[in-house]
Amino acid sequence: MAKDKLIGIDLGGTTIKFAIMTATGDIQQKWSIQTNILDEGSHIVPDIIDSINYHLDLYQLDKERIIGVGMGTPGTVNEKDGTVQGAFNLNWKESQNVKADLEAGLGFPVAVDNDANAAALGEQWRGAGNNQPEVVFVTLGTGVGGGLVNEGKMIHGAKGAAGEVGHMIVEPGGYQCTCGNYGCLEQYASATGVVHLAHDYADAYAGDSKLKAMVSNGEEITSKIVFDLAKEGDYLANEVVDKVAFYLGLATANIANLLNPSAIVIGGGVSAAGDFLLTRVQKNFNDFAFKMTRHVTELKLAELGNDAGAYGAASLALQAQAEN
């Protein structure tokens, strides 16, 4: 019987998402379960095993057809032995033997990587990266994450910390980051960074602005509100968006100069601003990028949304099979 199916798992602190897909990445079945982090996260792996085995029976899918299973997970992953450390939102306080435990319970080969890396692989394989071998993914959420794909594979670095795009310094001596450093991209281009900029700009602005009025009245400000007001023509909100785009343009230009990818894909909640943000980032990118990379690297918006992690996880399994 031919092996022609992949299983991708996107493990999150609230939800575990699953997808069964073909070897070429066409999703055929999707489902999700809640993440049970009680008892130091000891239920998570057994729940994954039970859910996969149950759904394979439900769909009457012969196990002999499964090429392998891939999973993206929070935390620091040793991709060789498949152990996970530092996944505190899963309540995993100690190192977890995730790969070995999943393989024992499922009977399939399992590949594990960090969730941001999995999302990057997903966008590179089946999303905006168009399956090109050199792609960088930048995700703008509560923080700023990223993943670097070189020759179709993730760059992990010496200790697994490659791709920490959010901790590039874009403003020396700037806002203090949660990492302890000052001026990280994460403090300017994440959802929380946009709000921080909005408050600082509002404090220094004396003109007429709805954003200024909202800040002065103590109303809650979100990055979406800032972008919506900017689209409506609010001067102060546009000043904030321009500054965010400046930092993103600087960071993406430096990435392009260093890695020369065919595409830098921007995803995450902040990227929902779409072309309104991207066109401004592109202008700054053009100002900062080296001539030889400026016309090669395309800035693009992510396409896969919440499915990126599952796609990327499945591609991990495909790559593992090719290497064996």
Image (cartoon, helix red, strand yellow):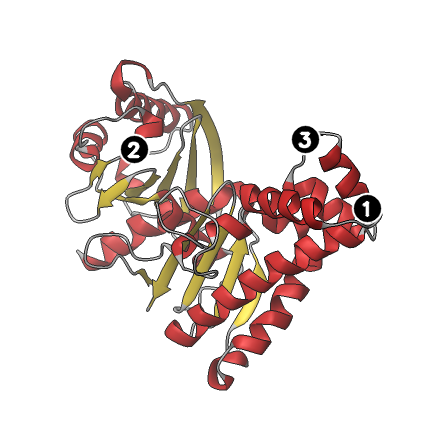
Task: Identify which amino acid the numbered label 3 is placed on.
Answer: Glu
* Mark 2, residue position: 87
* Mark 1, residue position: 209
Q: In the picture provided, is 66 more to the left or to the right than 55? A: left
Q: In the picture provided, is 217 more to the left or to the right than 197? A: right
Task: Identify which amino acid the numbered label 1 is placed on.
Answer: Ser
- The percent position of residue 322, horizontal first and vertical second, equals 24, 58
Q: In the picture provided, is 189 more to the left or to the right than 47? A: right
Report the mark closest to the observer, 3 or 2: 3
Q: Is residue 118 above or below residue 297?
A: above
- Residue shown at 81%/46% (left/top)? 209
Categorize mark 3 by other alpha carbons within 10 Å: few (<14), some (14-19), many (20+): few
Numbered tag placed on residue 167 in the rendering: none
Q: CA distance from mark 2 to mark 1?
A: 42 Å
Categorize mark 1 by other alpha carbons within 10 Å: few (<14), some (14-19), many (20+): some
Q: CA distance from mark 1 to mark 3?
A: 16 Å
Which numbered disc, 1 or 3, marks the residue that appears first in the sequence? 1
- The percent position of residue 196, horizontal first and vertical second, equals 58, 43
Report the mark closest to the observer, 1 or 3: 1
Element type at marker 2? loop
Q: Is residue 161 above or below residue 85?
A: below
Task: Identify which amino acid the numbered label 2 is placed on.
Answer: Ala
Numbered tag placed on residue 220 in the rendering: 3
- Residue shown at 54%/52% (left/top)? 189
Element type at marker 3? loop
Q: In the picture provided, is 81 more to the left or to the right than 287? A: left
